[in-house]
Image (cartoon, helix red, strand yellow):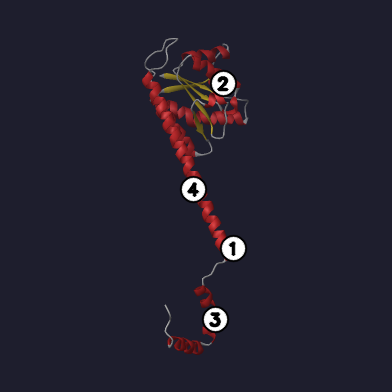
Amino acid sequence: MKNCFIVCPIGNEDTETRKRSDSLYKHVILPVCKETGFEAIRIDKENTTGSITEEIFKHLNEDDLVIADLTENNPNAFYEMGYRSALNKPSIHLMTKDSTIPFDVSAIRSFSYDLSDLDSVEEVKGRLIQTISSMNFDQALSEHESPTTNSLINTQLLQEVYKIQDSIAKLSETIEAKDSVAVSVLADKLASTNTKTADTVLMETLLPKFLENPEQMLKLAEFANKFPSKK
């Protein structure tokens, strides 16, 4: 089984950082790794008696894939991903939906997630599975060798497709929101002006009179019929 090393801000027990990282690990990363044939490795869950720093760099050097959560702009995470990038070995970036990251890193495609939205969780899992499946891990890489061209092209194409999908989704949401606002404004305008046609005003005036004295109104109608209308 191939190894996938997880880089993320861990934080202390009972902190929001730890809760988010644990949820991401449990509900997204573990299922994705299982589906794609990887063993997920997170340093705080390993039983190691040696130096944690040495263990981290061992995984960064040797593991087939690294998945990093860049949420909170954690310095250790950025440092470790910079090291991994220098090795020209496969890695994937994640971050929460509302995260912002430094300009130099923002150019690298990151998959956003929202753990409070089940649809978002399923979507990012599907995208990760497809992206990992497009990578070639079978061919061992030398120290200065980069992943195969086809693997890189496939991954980049997938990332561009996902970027287009996200842009279309945002555009649809914007158009839908503007349409809703336009309808609401029009409804408010009509309600405030209370516009009535001449026929509506005539009917509202004559109907009470007709109910009060039907016979008189019928005679008025017969009298009006004696004069042809002008068109």
- In front of the other: label 1 or label 4? 1
C-alpha span from label 1 to label 4: 24 Å
**Nearer to us in this view, 64 or 109:** 109
Q: Amino acid at mark 4?
A: Glu
- In front of the other: label 1 or label 3? 1
Q: Secondary structure at mark 3?
A: helix
Q: Position of residue 54 (x, y in %)?
A: 55, 11
Say which residue appears at 52% left-offset and 48% top-offset.
Answer: 177
Q: Position of residue 150 (x, y in %)?
A: 36, 21
Tag 2 or tag 1, which sits nearer the N-term? 2
C-alpha span from label 4 to label 2: 38 Å
C-alpha span from label 1 to label 2: 57 Å
Q: Amino acid at mark 1?
A: Ser
Say which residue appears at 49% left-offset and 44% top-offset.
Answer: 173
Tag 3 or tag 1, which sits nearer the N-term? 1
Question: In the drawing, does residue 230 fall left or right of residue 77?
Answer: left
Q: Position of residue 160 (x, y in %)?
A: 43, 30
Q: Which residue is mark 3?
A: 208
C-alpha span from label 2 to label 3: 79 Å
Q: Which residue is mark 1?
A: 192
Question: Visible in this render: residue 185?
Answer: yes
Q: Amino acid at mark 2?
A: Phe
Tag 3 or tag 2, which sits nearer the N-term? 2
Q: Amino acid at mark 3?
A: Pro
Question: In the drawing, does residue 72 fall left or right of residue 1?
Answer: right
Q: Which residue is mark 2?
A: 78
Residues packed near mark 4 inside 10 Å, few (<14), some (14 to 19) or many (20 plus): few
